[in-house]
């Protein structure tokens, strides 16, 4: 059974009963009125406990079903989303100078990114609503995750992507048989076109900033981190930020655990944006409004000039006592190389932006060297080989001569 009790508008804070909402956003505030899903925590606390989790052999996100807005009808047929590893750093923590560093590797989800957590919820909600076609706009990961999860469940997908989408993610979409629309324009133009299509054809809307249920899927990364740390969380959790949905989900997961008494406090959340596209960073640091920004970064998954979920993105950091930093593309490429050579993990640019952000936060004194940190590596580097090559060193070139091989390698 679902323990959803209702919805709250993030703008006007009106609370709606769960059966009173027939649209994705607040009836009074329109599209800016992003909704937050509310739960009956008292009832959930009776069925979701440390003991029940220890006894649960399911390692997917469905182990947290009481905290999710879906029924159990279709769950056994989905791709296995979640259950990704949390590594305690070996060499990387020493390089950064932090006391303890943990890496949540979301690149090991079915389509190789954290976005699977939201997409599998979208697929289930579409099935529950009797809708056979799902649509979204995306810079890449949300699109490929939707296409893969929908293909598994026999649903059609129409995906709108900016023409700059990396070839790895575009190839995923086509392999999953999505109908892909490559839009000549930025992410805003892509989003607007997908919205027009959804409104016209009546497709299910997977756009996470609009659909309140999808943040609920993303929050499961926080639930897993807490459980993997035996509910003794690090001082900080760092996450890269584009539209604002993932960071909103991270906060929501920790908030849920706090309401259930499973953790004592919410860790400070560090939001990281690329300096070439940092509207939320600028709004937070100036305490001003979120203004449209250029989309000028190689980290395509966080290249969102007009964030659709700014309230949750800013509130997650404010309410947790955290901070925002911005990082250059050069530092992102350096972080890709650093993560690979110290920990053996290949992250895409947006996936390692949070690592580059930790470095900046330590330099700025935002994170103290004696504080512990978890960073969420959101996507696998194989999705963006072009930028991976920029971060990597050149191979050794030689003729097929044994003496030359010995001479060259001896120098190494």
Image: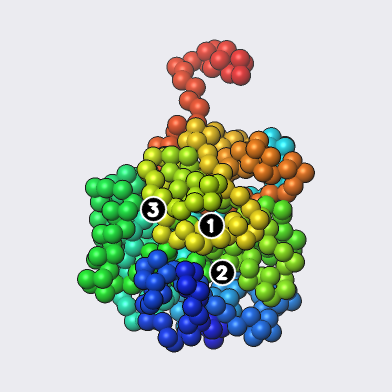
| Horizontal side, residue 346 vs residue 257: left or right | left
Query: What x and y, as percent, mark residue 263?
Result: 72, 67
The answer for how far apart the CA atoms under marks 2 and 3 are is: 30 Å
Q: Which mark is residue 314?
A: 1
Residue 336 is drawn in which quadrant?
A: top right
* Residue at (48, 25) in percent of width and height: 394
* Residue at (25, 55) in percent of width and height: 181
* Residue at (56, 15) in percent of width and height: 408
Check the image and report above or below for 339 versus 83. Answer: above
Query: What secondary structure is found at the residue carrying circle 1?
Result: helix
* Closer mark to the observer between disc 2 and disc 3: 3
* Residue at (28, 53) in percent of width and height: 189
| Horizontal side, residue 249 vs residue 24: left or right | right
Instruction: Give neighbour class at mark 2: few <14, some 14-19, many 20+ (Cα, 10 Å).
Output: many
User: Which mark is first along the chain, 3 or 2?
Assistant: 2
Location of mark 2 (residue): 61
Say which quadrant the C terminus sits in.
top right
Check the image and report above or below for 227 versus 185. Answer: below
Query: What secondary structure is found at the residue carrying circle 3?
Result: loop
Check the image and report above or below for 161 versus 57. Answer: above
User: Which mark is first along the chain, 1 or 2?
Assistant: 2
User: Which mark is first along the chain, 3 or 1?
Assistant: 3
Q: Which mark is residue 306?
A: 3
Q: Is residue 396 visible?
A: yes
The answer for how far apart the CA atoms under marks 1 and 3 are is: 14 Å
Q: Is residue 245 visible?
A: no
The answer for how far apart the CA atoms under marks 2 and 1 are is: 26 Å
Residue 31 is drawn in which quadrant?
A: bottom left
Instruction: Give neighbour class at mark 1: few <14, some 14-19, many 20+ (Cα, 10 Å).
Output: many
């Amino acid at each position: 059974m679902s323990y959803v009790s209702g919805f709250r508008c993030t703008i006007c804070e009106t609370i709606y009963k769960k059966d009173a909402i027939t649209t994705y956003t607040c009836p009074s505030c329109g599209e800016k009125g992003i909704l937050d899903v509310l739960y009956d925590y008292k009832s959930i606390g009776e069925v979701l406990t440390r003991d029940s989790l220890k006894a649960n052999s399911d390692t997917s996100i469905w182990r947290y079903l009481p905290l999710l807005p879906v029924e159990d009808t279709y769950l056994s047929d989905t791709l296995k989303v979640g259950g990704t590893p949390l590594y305690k750093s070996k060499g990387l923590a020493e390089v950064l100078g932090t006391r303890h560093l943990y890496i949540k590797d979301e690149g090991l989800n079915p389509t190789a990114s954290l976005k699977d957590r939201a997409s599998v919820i979208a697929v289930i909600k579409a099935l529950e609503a009797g809708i056979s076609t799902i649509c979204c706009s995306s810079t890449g990961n949300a699109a490929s995750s939707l296409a893969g999860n929908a293909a598994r469940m026999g649903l059609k997908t129409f995906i709108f992507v900016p023409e700059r989408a990396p070839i790895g993610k575009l190839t995923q979409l086509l392999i999953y048989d999505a109908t892909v629309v490559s839009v000549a324009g930025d992410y805003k133009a892509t989003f607007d076109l997908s919205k027009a299509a959804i409104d016209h054809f009546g497709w299910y809307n997977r756009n996470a900033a609009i659909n309140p249920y999808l943040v609920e899927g993303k929050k499961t990364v926080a639930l897993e981190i807490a459980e993997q740390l035996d509910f003794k969380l690090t001082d900080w959790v760092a996450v890269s930020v584009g539209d604002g949905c993932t960071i909103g989900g991270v906060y929501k997961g920790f908030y849920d655990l706090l309401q259930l008494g499973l953790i004592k406090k919410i860790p400070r959340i560090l939001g990281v944006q690329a300096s070439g596209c940092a509207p939320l960073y600028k709004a937070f640091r100036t305490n001003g409004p979120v203004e449209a920004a250029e989309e000028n970064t190689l980290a395509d998954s966080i290249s969102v000039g007009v964030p659709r979920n700014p309230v949750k993105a800013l509130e997650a950091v404010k309410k947790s006592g955290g901070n925002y930093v911005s990082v250059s593309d050069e530092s992102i490429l350096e972080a890709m190389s650093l993560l690979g050579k110290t920990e053996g993990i290949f992250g895409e640019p947006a996936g390692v932006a949070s690592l580059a952000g930790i470095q900046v936060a330590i330099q700025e004194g935002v994170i103290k060297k004696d504080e512990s940190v978890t960073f969420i590596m959101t996507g696998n580097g194989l999705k963006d080989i072009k930028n991976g090559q920029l971060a990597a060193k050149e191979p050794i070139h030689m003729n097929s001569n044994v003496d030359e091989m010995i001479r060259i390698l001896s120098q190494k």
